[in-house]
């Protein structure tokens, strides 16, 4: 059960990115490159492909939006509690992406892996109710 606060926060992020997408957006979150590499998930997944972590292709921080068919990455600028979406920097078909995630030490870390072998490791803080937002985001990511 989601709290009103989490639903409102998610709605605010979805609303800011929706005009930039050509399908209904179900979840969105701002994240940064998983720099802590202390994450077992990240080192395990990126270690397999000889460090094929392509996260550096994406801006840092990056705004990730999940639609019904696609996952979008945008360059953005924080504006207080709002977000100024600048430009789309990547788009993936949802059915071509695998998602793995973990919660540890106040962070949600996730890796988007493409069928072509690219992997994008990202993270965002989950303190103060952020875990609910993370769960909303991950369930949208994994919905096929």
Image (cartoon, rainbow, N blue to C red):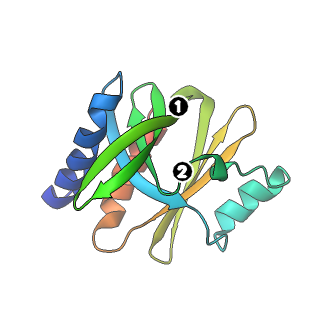
Q: Is residue 108 left or right of residue 137?
A: right
Quarter of image, res 31: bottom left
Q: Where residue 128 appears, x then y in whole percent?
A: 28, 74
Residue wearing tag 1: 91
Residue wearing tag 2: 59
Image vertical order of residue 50 relative to residue 88, above or below = below
Regarding residue 1, the answer to whether it shows in the image is no
Residue furthest top as drawn: 22
Q: CA distance from mark 1 to mark 2?
A: 13 Å
Q: Is residue 73 left or right of residue 18?
A: right
Q: Where residue 32 appears, x then y in whole percent?
A: 50, 60
Q: Where residue 40 appears, x then y in whole percent?
A: 68, 68
Residue at 13%, 56% (x, y): give it. Answer: 4
Identify the image quadrant of the N terminus. bottom left
Image vertical order of residue 108 relative to residue 73, above or below = below
Q: Is residue 110 left or right of residue 82?
A: right
Residue furthest bottom as drawn: 105
Residue at 71%, 41% (x, y): give it. Answer: 118
Residue at 67%, 61% (x, y): give it. Answer: 42
Label 2 crowding class (10 Å Cα cut-off): few <14, some 14-19, many 20+?
some
Label 1 crowding class (10 Å Cα cut-off): few <14, some 14-19, many 20+?
some
């Amino acid at each position: 059960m989601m709290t009103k606060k989490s639903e409102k926060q998610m709605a605010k992020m979805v609303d800011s990115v929706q005009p930039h997408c050509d399908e209904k957006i179900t979840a969105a979150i701002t994240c940064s490159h998983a720099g802590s590499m202390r994450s077992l998930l990240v080192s395990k997944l990126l270690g397999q492909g000889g460090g094929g972590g392509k996260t550096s292709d994406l801006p840092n921080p990056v705004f990730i939006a999940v639609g019904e068919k696609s996952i979008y990455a945008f360059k953005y600028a924080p504006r207080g509690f709002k977000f100024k979406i600048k430009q789309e920097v990547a788009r993936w078909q949802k059915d071509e992406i695998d998602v793995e995630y973990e919660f540890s030490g106040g962070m949600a870390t996730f890796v988007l892996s493409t069928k072509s072998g690219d992997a994008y490791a990202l993270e965002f803080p989950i303190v103060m109710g952020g875990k609910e937002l993370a769960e909303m985001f991950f369930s949208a990511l994994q919905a096929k």
